[in-house]
Amino acid sequence: MALLENEHIRLRALEPEDLDLLYRWENDTSQWNVGNTLSPFSRYILKEYIANSHLNIYELKQQRFMIELKPDGTAIGMIDLYDFEPHHRRAGVGIMLDRLYQGKGFAMEALDLTVEYAFSFLRLHQLYSHVPAKNSPSKALFERCGFILTSVLTDWIVTKEGYSDVYVMQRITTKLTDN
């Protein structure tokens, strides 16, 4: 089996054809509370982002993969490695799945593939994620994929209800890598 795929899904690079999906997903204001988005993205900015996505993780400090179904190639979400730190061998990981495909196990498969890529190919030592405390499905996803809650960032994000905590979840590999 190839590194970035299994029998159900494939993680692939961004394509120009992804522009409309990215525009819809990135500008979904109901999702802004789980990230740091403060204003909409223009098609121009997203087109430039896609055009520069050929740069590698060492240059951008980030790698975005589209999650697509096999065999028809339907894009169902995206998963990011961000804040890549090659010296410390760590990166953050974030995932977004289209609502139509949530609850079917695809997020867990995509996260498992990303973990394998990060630990075996990039040879990272750890991955982490910031999960809003009120996002119990996301917390459960990361726990199912071997992440543990290591700390709580108190009053870290602003929500409609006021300040909310964020969980720091980490997964550290037990494999030894060369220096």
Image (cartoon, grey):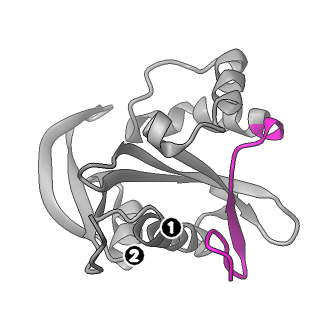
97 or 73: which is nearer to us? 73
Residue beneath the point at 71% across and 16% down: 44
Q: Position of residue 28 (x, y in %)?
A: 59, 34
- 113 drawn magenta: no
Tell me which segment is drawn in magenta.
1-18
Left or right side of 1 for 138: left
Crowd around label 2: few <14 · some 14–19 · many ≥20 (10 Å): some
> Of the numbered discs in the image, which one, if any, rests on residue 145?
2
Amino acid type at image mark 2: Cys
Dividing the picture into quarters, in which one does residue 161 lie? top left
96 lies above or below 31:
below
Residue beneath the point at 14% across and 38% down: 155
Most distant residue in the right direction: 72
Quarter of the picture containing the N terminus is bottom right
- 9 drawn magenta: yes
Sequence order check, earlier mark of 2 and 1: 1
Q: Position of residue 109 (x, y in %)?
A: 56, 74
Badge nearest the viewer, 2 or 1: 1
Dividing the picture into quarters, in which one does residue 3 lie? bottom right
